């Protein structure tokens, strides 16, 4: 059984996937006739993946700026492989950060932090060059991983800060319903968190007081 794809059809599939024609013809000649169908399917799947990544990056300019090398860097295949690898690293980082923070840390948020901190893929290339031990070629992503770690910490700090802001707002609203305000001596800690084993004498550990009982009244 020789399959349904001819040698010339396989060449055209390779070319459509971004392979230069001379290399496509050489590759097609090296593939046995009964393996052409599998090779064609593999290249078609790769093209679908490429198209999906291009569409995603076109729809998310922040992520695109964070993970894409400059159009002048190397060739299209190298740029695609690099962007794809960087996206996977950012996705994994977002999932891990969301679990750690107990909230939704998005890919776009991390990408924005990379931009703000000067840690994009292109920033990494500009700083370290193309040495595969240091930057984006192959599977190392060495320098980019460090930039990504800094971006995650930046995002996690923002997430924690927002969570604290919401907690304070919810406490203030609950106390306001009772005619109380946050104790301005302990900041609502009641003494236990700030002074272990001690109680704030401004609120007697209740964390909130009547407005007229605050020191700033």
Image: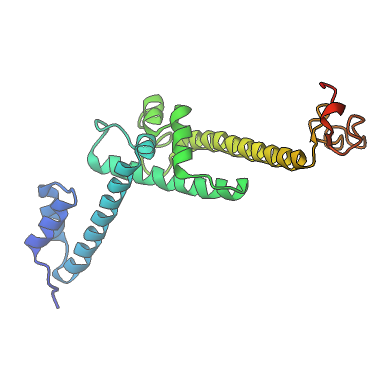
For image coordinates 17% across by 72% down, the residue present is 34
Q: Nearer the viewer, residue 96 or 192?
A: 192
**Residue 26 location, x and y as percent?**
12, 54
Determine the image quadrant of residue 136: top left
Q: Is residue 150 above or below residue 30?
A: above
Q: Nearer the viewer, residue 187 or 51?
A: 187
18 displayed left or right of 63: left
Q: In this view, does 132 lie above or below 24?
A: above
For image coordinates 10% across by 54% down, the residue present is 25
59 displayed left or right of 31: right
Q: In which quarter of the image is the N terminus?
A: bottom left
**Residue 64 location, x and y as percent?**
34, 38
41 displayed left or right of 114: left
Which scheme is used to colour this image of the protein? rainbow
For image coordinates 12% across by 61% down, the residue present is 10
Q: In which quarter of the image is the C terminus?
A: top right
**Residue 195 location, x and y as percent?**
87, 32
């Amino acid at each position: 059984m020789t399959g349904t794809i001819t040698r010339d059809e396989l060449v055209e599939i390779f070319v459509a996937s971004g392979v230069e024609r001379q290399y496509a013809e050489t590759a097609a000649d090296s593939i046995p006739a009964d393996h052409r169908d599998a090779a064609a399917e593999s290249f078609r799947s790769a093209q679908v993946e490429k198209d999906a990544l291009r569409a995603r990056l076109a729809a998310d300019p922040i992520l695109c700026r964070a993970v894409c090398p400059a159009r002048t860097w190397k060739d299209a295949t190298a740029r695609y492989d690099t962007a794809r690898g960087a996206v996977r690293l950012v996705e994994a980082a977002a999932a891990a950060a969301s679990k750690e923070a107990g909230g939704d840390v998005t890919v776009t948020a991390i990408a924005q932090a990379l931009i703000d901190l000067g840690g994009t893929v292109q920033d990494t290339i500009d700083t370290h060059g193309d040495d595969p031990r240091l930057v984006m070629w192959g599977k190392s992503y060495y320098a980019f991983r460090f930039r990504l770690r800094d971006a995650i910490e930046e995002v996690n700090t923002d997430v924690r800060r927002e969570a604290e802001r919401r907690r304070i707002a919810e406490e203030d609203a609950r106390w306001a319903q009772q005619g109380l305000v946050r104790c301005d001596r302990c900041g609502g800690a009641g003494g236990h968190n700030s002074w272990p084993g001690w109680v704030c004498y401004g609120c007697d550990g209740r964390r909130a007081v009547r407005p007229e009982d605050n020191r700033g009244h």
